[in-house]
Image: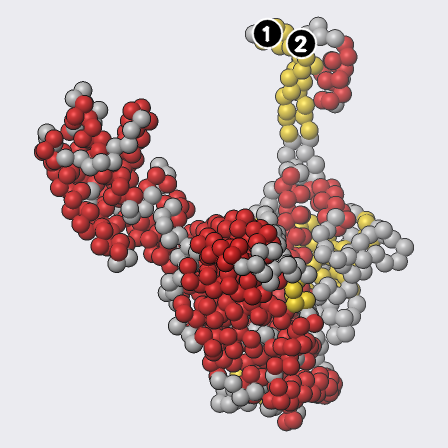
Amino acid sequence: MPDLLIELFSEEIPARMQTRAGEDLKKRITDGLVEAGLTYAHAHALTTPRRLTLAVEGLLAESPTIREERKGPKVGAPEKAIEGFLRGAGISRDQLEERDTPKGAVYFAIIEKPGRPAAGIVAEVLADTIRNFPWPKSMRWGSGALRWVRPLHSILCILSDEAGAQVVPMEIDGITAGDTTEGHRFMAPGRFAVTGFEDYAAKLKRAFVVLSPEERAEHIWNDAQNMAFAAGLEVVEDKSLLAEVAGLVEWPVVLMGQIDDEFLDLPPEVLQTSMKEHQKFFSVRNPKTGRIERFITVANRETTDNGATILAGNQKVLSARLADAKFFWENDLRVAKADITQWTRALENVTFHNKLGTQAQRIDRIAALARELATVTGADPDQAEKAARLAKADLSSEMVYEFPELQGLMGRYYIEAAGEDAAVAAVAQEHYSPLGPSDDVPTAPLSVTVALADKLDTLTGFWAIDEKPTGSKDPFALRRAALGVTRLILNNDLRMNLDRFFDAQLVRAEAASNEALHDEHVAELLDEIADHGVFGAAFRAVMEKLAGDEAGKHQVTDFMHLERKVPDTSEDLLTFFHDRLKVFLRDEGIRHDVIDACIAMDGNDDLNLLVKRARALNAVIATEDGENLVQGFKRANNILTQAEEKDGVEYSFGADLKFAETDSEKALFAALDQAQAKIAPALKAEDFPAAMAAMAALRGPIDAFFEDVQVNSDNAVLRRNRLNLLSQIRQICSSVADLTKIEG
C-alpha cells in the first residue's frame, strides 16, 4: 500500500487561517479519496506560513472493481424504454440478460466498473480541492484564473512505496506537480527533491523549517520561559498569541528585549495589550512587583549578531507605540481627575441603537434599574446608581478608543484616579461579566447590581423593539446576556422576581422611543410597579389617576398601548429565559421535562427558586420510588380526568375515611394526611428536598391502593369517595410540581 504526500507551497498564509486550512485540506482530500473507493489507514495535516502539507498512510494502490446489477424494463417493453435503460446503464443490447420473475420476463444489466490506479484518482481529487478550496479570502495573480489565499508557487504530490516514489501527474493553471519543495526563504533557499514524508520532514528540518505548528509553539514557549527565568522574571501566558506567533515563523528564534524605563509605570494591561496587538510580543513580568519590564519577540531566522539588530529595530518601533499609549494614559488621567463626568456627558452624542437612544440614555435606564435592584442584592442604592453612571465612562477615553478590549479595566483605573471608592471603581471592570459560560461571576454587591442592570436593560430593550435572536443569529449576544443574568442570580443566591424588573425596564425602553409619553406619568407608573410588584395593578392605578386628572386625560390613549405590549413582551422574555435555563441545567443532568414541571408552578420568574425546585425534583424522579410515584400520579390523574369529563362534575370536595373499605384504602388516607403535614411547611420554608421526599413516600400507599381497589365501583358512593381521594393525590403532588409535564 503506497503512502501519499501532498504539499501546496505558496506565499505567506495568514496565521489565523492556517489551522482551519490544514483541516479543510485533510477533509476534502480524504473524503474525495474514500468516495472514489480509495481507503487509507491514517492521515494528518501540517502547516507552516508557506505550506499546507498532508500525509496519507496506507492508501489502496487502486480502487476496487465494482459489479452492479440493475433491473430494467420488461421483455417486450417499448423500444424507447429499452434504449433509455441501455443509455443509463452504459451497455449494449447484447449485454442484457433475460430473467423470469413473478411478474414475467425482465431485462437485467450487469455493470462492471473496473478499478482505477490511485494516481489518477488522487490527481482528480487534488485538482478539485485546489480549485474549490474554502479560503475566507482568496486572490488571483498574473493572468491565471486560479484563486488561492496567496500566490501558489508549487505542488508536491507523490505516491511512495517500497519500490520508490512516483510523482502524481497533474497540472493546474500552469503549475505542474512534482517531487520538490523549498526550505527556509533566507537560510536555505533553493529546491530539493523528496521521496516520502519522513524524508520530506527530515530535509525540511535540515533546511531550517519546523513542519509541526505544535512543535514550533512548544519551542517558542520553552525558550521564552527559560530566558525569563534566567533574568528572574516570568512570561505572561497567552495561548492565543502563542498559536498566532507559531503561525508566523518556520524557524522560530526567541529573543528577549528591554522596555524603556519611561514606560514601565504604565498599567501592565496597557503594556501587554499594546505589545500583543501591534507587535505580537509576549509580556515578561517581574513577579515581585507585577510590572511588565521586558518583552519576548520571535524572529524567523538566525543571524550572525544573535538577533541584536532585530531587537534594536523592534525596540525602536515598540517605543513609538508605547509613547502613544503613554500619551493616552496621561491625558485620560488628567480628564478623570478634573471631571470624569464629562466623559459620560460626551456619550449623549453616541448612539447605542437608533430605536433605543444614545449611550447616555441607556446609562440613565441602567442607573435607575440598579437603584431598584440594590434592594435585592444588598447594595447601597445611592452607590449602585453612582457606580452605574460611571461604569461606562471610559468609553469616551482615548485609551479605550485605541484599545477597545481595555474597556472596563481602564474605567477602574480612571474612576479610582477620580477619587471614588474602590468598590465603585471595580464595577467598571466587573459589570461586563460573565461574558461566557466559563467566565468568573462577580460577587461584590455593587458589581452584581450593575451587571444585572446592564444585561437586563440590554434584553428588555431589544425585546421592546422586537430584535430577538432567530435561529443561529444573535447579533446582539442576547443569549449570552440571559445566561449572564442566570449565573449572576444563581451564583450569588439572589431571590428576585424577574417579571417586576422586566416590566419596569420595558416601560423605560418604550418611553425612550415614544416622545408622547410624559416623563412625570412614566415615573408614576414605575413607582406603582415598584409598589405593586406587577404591571397590571400598577397600570390600572396610573390610568385611574390620569382619567381623574384633567391635565392627564390626553395621556390615556398614549398609555393604552403599554397595557397591550408590556405584559406580552415580558412573558415572551421570561419564556426565553426558561429556554436558556434548560440549556444551562442540561450539563447538570437535569431533564428538560423536569424543568417544565417546575416552570408550571407559581413564582417561575424567580430563577433561584425554580432551579432549587428542579434540582430536588430531578433527584427524586431519578430514584425508583420517584419514578413509580410519577406513574401512580399519572394513573390517578388520568382516571380522575376521565371521570370528571364523563360526569361533568369536579371531584375535589374531600374524601371521607368512613367510606374506606380496604386496609390499603385506609392506609392511603393516612399517608396523604402525613404527606400533607410535611409538604406544606416544607414548601413554605422552601425546603424542596424535604417536600419531594415526603411526596416520594406516597409511592408505596398509592401502588397498594391501585392493586387492591377498583376506583370505578358499581357503588356510586364508594366511586365518588375514591375519585375524591384521587383528587387529593393530585392536589398534594401538584403542590410540589406539575407532574403531568414529566415524560414517560
Residue at horizontal 18%, vertical 23%? 716
Label 1 residue SS: loop
Side (left or right) of 535 relative to 554:
left
The residue to which callout 2 is attached is 74
Tell me residue 9's x, y (percent). 75, 60
Label 2 residue SS: strand
The residue to which callout 1 is attached is 103
Disc number placed over residue 501 in the picture, else none:
none
Residue at horizontal 47%, vertical 77%? 382
Tell me residue 7's x, y (percent). 71, 57
Residue 127 in sight from this viewpoint: yes
Which quarter of the rendered picture does the N terminus lie within?
top right
Residue 99's place in the image compared with 116, above or below, is above
Residue 702 in sight from this viewpoint: no
- When asked about the image quadrant of residue 217, the answer is bottom right
At label 1, which amino acid type do we have? Lys
Residue at horizontal 20%, vertical 28%? 720
Residue at horizontal 42%, vertical 55%? 605
Tell me residue 392's x, y (percent). 59, 74
Ranked by sequence position, the earlier of labels 2 and 1 is: 2
- When asked about the image quadrant of residue 52, the answer is bottom right
Check if mark 2's residue and mark 1's residue have beta carbons within 8 Å: yes
Q: CA distance from mark 2 to mark 1?
A: 9 Å
Q: Residue reaching furthest front? A: 550
Residue 107's place in the image compared with 723, above or below, is above
